[in-house]
Image: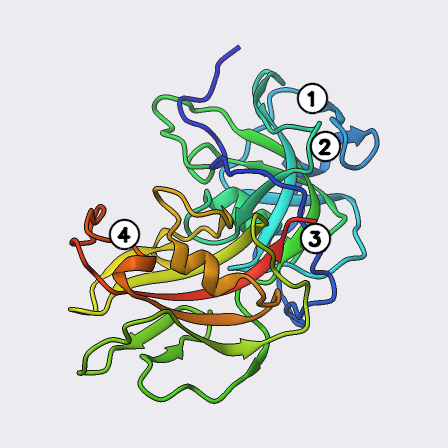
Amino acid sequence: MRALPVLLLTAGIVASLTSCATAPFTQTCTPTVHSGDASDVVTVTGTFGSKPTVDFPTPIVTKKVERTQALDGTGPVVADGDVVVIKYTAYNGATGDIVGQGDYSGPGQPLTLGKSVNKAVSEGLDCARVGSRVVIASSAANAGQDPAKFPDAIVFVIDIVDAYPGKAWGTPQIPQAGMPSVVTAPNGAPGVTVPKENPPSTLAVNALRVANGTTVKAGDKVVVKYTALLWSDSSVFDSTWTKGQAKIVTLTPSDTITKGFVKGLVGQAVGSQVLIVAPPSDGYGSAGSAGVPAGSTLIYVVDILGVDG
């Protein structure tokens, strides 16, 4: 068996997450990949959400990405930027050996579709519906592998068990005076302008978009996209948007999760976008952190996409 030199799919912290099937997803979507000779010869049986039984004649050869629906879902359509929860197995197209596999015993692995995921998986899942079982046949290069080291085609069998919209969908609210101003790109990524004045001395929270989803509680595991920056010079010290992956965060203060971040999200609803300004006492205090000088006032813009059920 020839194992892949790198993990096929970026691992994430897995939680049992509240479904967001009622949240808005794209209504129009045109897939960029279609079925072909390589993906069509793969036979998949077994219960959706469980480890499948997969059979195909070897070797499978393809120079592109192909996708065949082994099972058609009826849930929301997922697209670039959305967070999908998947269960998957990957196979060497030349030998049929398993070269990568997720955990079928848990709720699944969260993955944000887009450039941070290998091209084959992102394009293969684009425009699919939650509840689908998708067969993707891909060249090694399109699956993020070095063809010189792994020349064989790769076959993915992926169950899409759940999904979350890629950005907050709540109703826009009136910004608070004295707070940073926030504008968002079409994909939801925020741009922040910091006022040229002293920051507030106590925690300030402004819900920029308000939804009617599940209310967030202390200790919950929340699916979020966020940008974090310094009031002093507007520099960004952390952002899921630049990394291309949503993050699952436990709302308990820790060395990496500040009290201000937790306090600002508790009581908010899934689907909301929240602006938080945290003074040093609710941030990293006199110790500071990587990219955060001691005594810094912090700014967070957080999209709440899901919550632990």
Q: Which residue is mark 4?
A: 284
Chain-order first, disc 2 or disc 1: 2
- How far apart are labels 2 and 1 at the CA level? 7 Å
Q: Which residue is farthest top? A: 1
Q: In what element is the residue under mark 1? A: loop
Chain-order first, disc 2 or disc 4: 2
Residue 281 point in image, percent of width and height:
29, 58
The mark found on residue 41 in the picture is 2
Question: Three-letter amino acid code at disc 4?
Answer: Tyr
Question: Three-letter amino acid code at disc 3?
Answer: Thr
Q: In what element is the residue under mark 4? A: loop
Residue 253 point in image, percent of width and height:
43, 47
Query: Which-is-in-front pick, marks 1 and 4?
Result: 4
- How far apart are labels 2 and 4 at the CA level? 55 Å
The mark found on residue 57 in the picture is 1
- How far apart are labels 3 and 4 at the CA level? 30 Å
Residue 170 point in image, percent of width and height:
59, 76
Give above or below for 217 relative to 202: above
Q: Which residue is mark 3?
A: 18
- How far apart are labels 3 and 2 at the CA level? 35 Å
Q: 232 left or right of 245?
A: left
Query: Which-is-in-front pick, marks 2 and 4?
Result: 4
10 Å crowding of disc 1: few (<14), some (14-19), many (20+): few
